[in-house]
């Protein structure tokens, strides 16, 4: 069972699924499992250390640990743009809904497109399965899918951009609605380790060492310092309890 806490430090030699629910650590990129994912599945260089590389690799490893990267599984990526991760996942699953607010006027280069599917397909940086990708223009607070229709959802540093408290709650409720019983929503987001909550328009506020975003024993905040920590959070859903 997963609880609401996050582990700190590098991954153990043989990580269990709960070990992937953790605060970001660049040293994880030296882990044999993560190195293999970065090189073989993502087609990237583990020496190019970055926040996004860690997010992609840890998310992939976590999905794999839950047995979700299989030919019979269906997933959904929120705020996907043209991320490396979606292409790697497309090679493993039956169907991946690739969603974002794609439009020609988007301020995000990863979603700036008239023809969203053509944009996603032509932007592929690694081999992928186009037949497993269904691209949709979708607000992550209002996913246009039936109840219990996907095995997993994921988002990579996207949920902090969707609005304020009510938007955040709406998003999680909708994720629970579209997930099958026992489905998993896996997400990364930015946690600002400051003494006070920092509220920004279109960025969900993070409070220091609160809720499921961090633990006091792994981050010691300083009121004058704003340090970014990227946690991976795994949320299992049960139909009767979401």
Image (cartoon, rainbow, N blue to C red):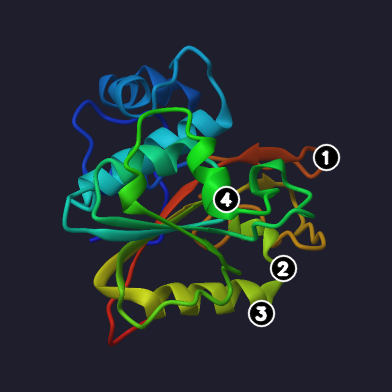
Residue that numbered label 1 is attached to: 224
Quadrant in the rendering for residue 62 = top left
Tell us which disc is closer to us: 4 or 1.
4
Which x, y percent locates residue 59? 39, 43
Neighbour tally class for label 2: few under 14, some 14-19, many 20 plus, Cα within 10 Å: some
**Is there a contact, CB below 8 Å, between mark 3 and mark 4?**
no
Q: CA distance from mark 2 to mark 3?
A: 8 Å
Q: CA distance from mark 3 to mark 4?
A: 17 Å
Tell us which disc is closer to us: 2 or 4.
2
**Is there a contact, CB below 8 Å, between mark 2 and mark 3?**
yes
What residue sits 40% from the left and 39% below the top?
A: 87
What residue sits 28% from the left and 61% below the top?
A: 74
Mark 2 or mark 4, earlier in chain: 2
Q: Is residue 16 above or below residue 29?
A: below
Residue that numbered label 4 is attached to: 189
- Disc 4 element: loop
Residue that numbered label 2 is attached to: 163
């Amino acid at each position: 069972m997963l609880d609401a806490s996050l582990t700190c430090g590098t991954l153990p030699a043989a990580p269990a699924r709960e070990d992937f629910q953790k605060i970001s650590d660049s040293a994880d990129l030296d882990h044999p499992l993560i190195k293999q994912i970065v090189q073989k599945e993502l087609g990237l260089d583990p020496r190019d250390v970055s926040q996004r590389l860690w997010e992609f690799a840890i998310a992939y490893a976590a999905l794999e640990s839950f047995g979700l990267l299989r030919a019979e599984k269906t997933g959904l990526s929120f705020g996907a743009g043209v991320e490396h991760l979606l292409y790697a996942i497309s090679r493993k699953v039956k169907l991946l809904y690739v969603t974002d607010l794609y439009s020609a006027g988007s301020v995000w280069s990863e979603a700036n497109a008239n023809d969203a599917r053509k944009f996603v397909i032509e932007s592929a940086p690694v081999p992928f399965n186009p037949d497993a990708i269904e691209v949709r223009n979708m607000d992550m607070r209002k996913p246009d899918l039936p109840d219990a229709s996907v095995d997993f959802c994921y988002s990579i540093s996207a949920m902090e951009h969707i609005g304020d408290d009510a938007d955040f709650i709406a998003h999680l409720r909708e994720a629970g609605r579209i997930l099958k019983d026992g489905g998993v929503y896996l997400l990364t987001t930015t946690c600002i380790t400051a003494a006070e909550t920092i509220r920004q328009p279109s960025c969900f506020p993070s409070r220091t060492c609160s809720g499921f975003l961090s633990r006091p024993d792994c981050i010691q905040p300083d009121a004058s310092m704003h340090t970014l920590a990227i946690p991976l959070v795994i949320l299992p859903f049960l139909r009767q309890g979401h």
